[in-house]
Image: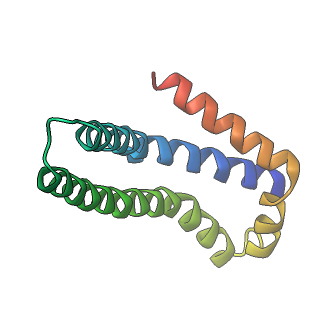
Amino acid sequence: MTFAVAAFLSIIFALSFRLSGVVNVCGRVVTICRSAAATFFDAQQSDVQREQAARAAARALLRSLLEIAARIAGAALPPAAAAWLLNLFGVLSLGDVLARLQTWPLILMGAVAMLVVFMIGK
């Protein structure tokens, strides 16, 4: 029973992670970095323009970092809430579920679940 619940929580996390939009934000980060690098290596730009572009990219990257962290925390809420409720109602011990989540079979299953969820979404 504990294994099934832990597997279910892994799948819930994979789905909520996919729905959180973290991948889209990461794509935006790559675009910001490419644009900043192109501006930095452009011989036509003055030093002031390069510095302004670097500062703007740094601000955008910091905002993206905070957004990614918030989205990951949001993705972790549904499985955490489900585990907490199961513990609250005495169905399963939270310690047992967390111990089961740290075993290799569930780590591998969680990785496969993440891959499947992202492949289906494309």
Give the image location of residue 17, x and y in percent. Answer: 49, 47
In this rendering, the answer to whether 116 lies above or below 88 is: above
Give the image location of residue 97, x and y in percent. Answer: 77, 65
Q: Residue at x 37, y 39 (%)?
A: 30
Left or right of residue 64: residue 104:
right
Tell me which corner region of the image, top left, top right, bottom left or bottom right, holds residue 116: top right
Q: Residue at x 38, y 60 (%)?
A: 65
Q: How many numbered circles does the render carry?
A: 0
One can see residue 85 in this view: yes
Identify the coloring: rainbow
Tell me which corner region of the image, top left, top right, bottom left or bottom right, holds residue 28: top left
Question: In what quadrant of the picture does the C terminus appear?
Answer: top left
One can see residue 1 in this view: no
Give the image location of residue 21, x and y in percent. Answer: 38, 44
Left or right of residue 29: residue 49:
left
Q: Residue at x 12, y 51 (%)?
A: 49
Question: In what quadrant of the picture does the N terminus appear?
Answer: bottom right
Tell me which corner region of the image, top left, top right, bottom left or bottom right, holds residue 109: top right
Left or right of residue 48: residue 62:
right
Give the image location of residue 111, x and y in percent. Answer: 70, 40
Q: Residue at x 29, y 39 (%)?
A: 41
